[in-house]
Structures are given as C-alpha cells and as structure tokens.
Amino acid sequence: MIRRVLLLFSAGIIAAMGLAACNGDDDGDDANGVGNGDSISMDMGEFYFDPDDISGDAGSELTIELENTGSQVHNFTIEEGDARGDGFDAWPDSEVQLELTEGESGSLTLSLPDEAGEYEFICTIPGHYESGQWGTLTVN
Ligand SMILES: [Cu+2]
C-alpha cells in the first residue's frame, strides 16, 4: 500500500515538471519567431538560423534562447555599425555575440534600439555567413 502511494506521488511530480517545461516555452516561439519584448527560441546549425526572421518593439528587451543543433561551433552576432548585407541598418550599439559549441544552449538578451529598422544577425565563423548563415531582426 505504501509503495502504491509513492508511485502515485512520483507520477504527480513528473506531470508537474512537464507542465512547467511547457510554460517556459509558450510565447514568442511560434508565428515565425515573432516576439515583442519577450523570448524567442532559435536553433543554429550548418549554415542557418531557424527562425531567420525575428522582430521586436523599439526600446524593448528581447531574449533569444539559442541552441546549436549543428555539428560545429556557431555564433549569433550583431556587428556594431554597418551590416555586411545590403539594405540593413547600422546597429547603433556595441557588438552582441553568443557563441556555442555543438549541442550547447544559451540565452542572450538584446536591448533593442530606439529606432525602428532592419538589422542583420550573422555567424562570424569564417565561411558561415557566406554560406547563408544570417537572418533579419526587424525592430518595429
Ligand atoms: Cu556558423
């Protein structure tokens, strides 16, 4: 009888853990990564970011939960000043970068500029940007 009670108790804890995991991942993770001052989940690999088109409100904070699902080192970088790609706005703040080894996860909180614009995020590992590893951050 005692053993049965313990099993039920364990099942309750596991269910609660499952719910908690869902709660941490319920906003900004759909609708093509669109988030406003909240959190976006993003994978990076050879040679992409997924999603590669994200947005947020001017002057707000945007947290990006990154996972390197590839098989080599990658980074998420917004370079200071002029972007490499044509048509992007110059990032007004100092460089932002988070580099992760394969299989590693981490998070990065961006303070979005007060000016609306389209900014470019890239992987600066040699050859990766040229292979298409870049994306667009739209500040509304
Ligand atoms: Cu890369």
Image (cartoon, helix red, strand yellow):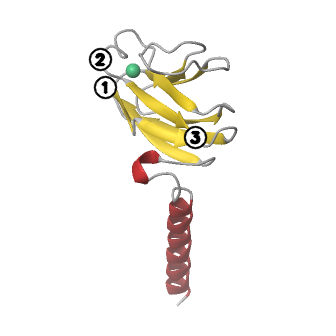
Residue 132 rendering spot, x and y as whole percentages: 32, 21
Residue 36 appearing in the image:
yes
Foreground residue among 53 and 122: 53
Farthest residue, direction bottom: 1
| Mark 1 vs mark 3: in front | 3
Question: Is 108 on the left or on the right of 119, as rendered?
Answer: right
Say if disc 1 is inside 8 Å of ligand 1. Answer: yes
Amino acid beneath label 2: Ser
> Which disc is residue 104 wearing?
none
Whether residue 46 is situated above or below residue 16 in the rendered picture: above
The answer to whether mark 1 and mark 2 are in CB contact below 8 A is yes
Answer with the quadrant where ligand 1 appears in the image.
top left
Residue 105 appearing in the image:
no
| Mark 2 vs mark 3: in front | 3
* Residue drawn 41% across the image and 37% down it: 43
Say if disc 2 is inside 8 Å of ligand 1. Answer: no
Q: Which residue matches tag 1?
A: 46
Q: Which residue matches tag 2?
A: 131
Amino acid beneath label 3: Asn
Q: Which residue matches tag 3?
A: 140
Separation of disc 2 and disc 3 at Cα? 28 Å
Residue 49 rendering spot, x and y as whole percentages: 39, 32
Residue 56 rendering spot, x and y as whole percentages: 57, 42
Question: Between disc 2 and disc 3, whose residue precedes?
Answer: 2
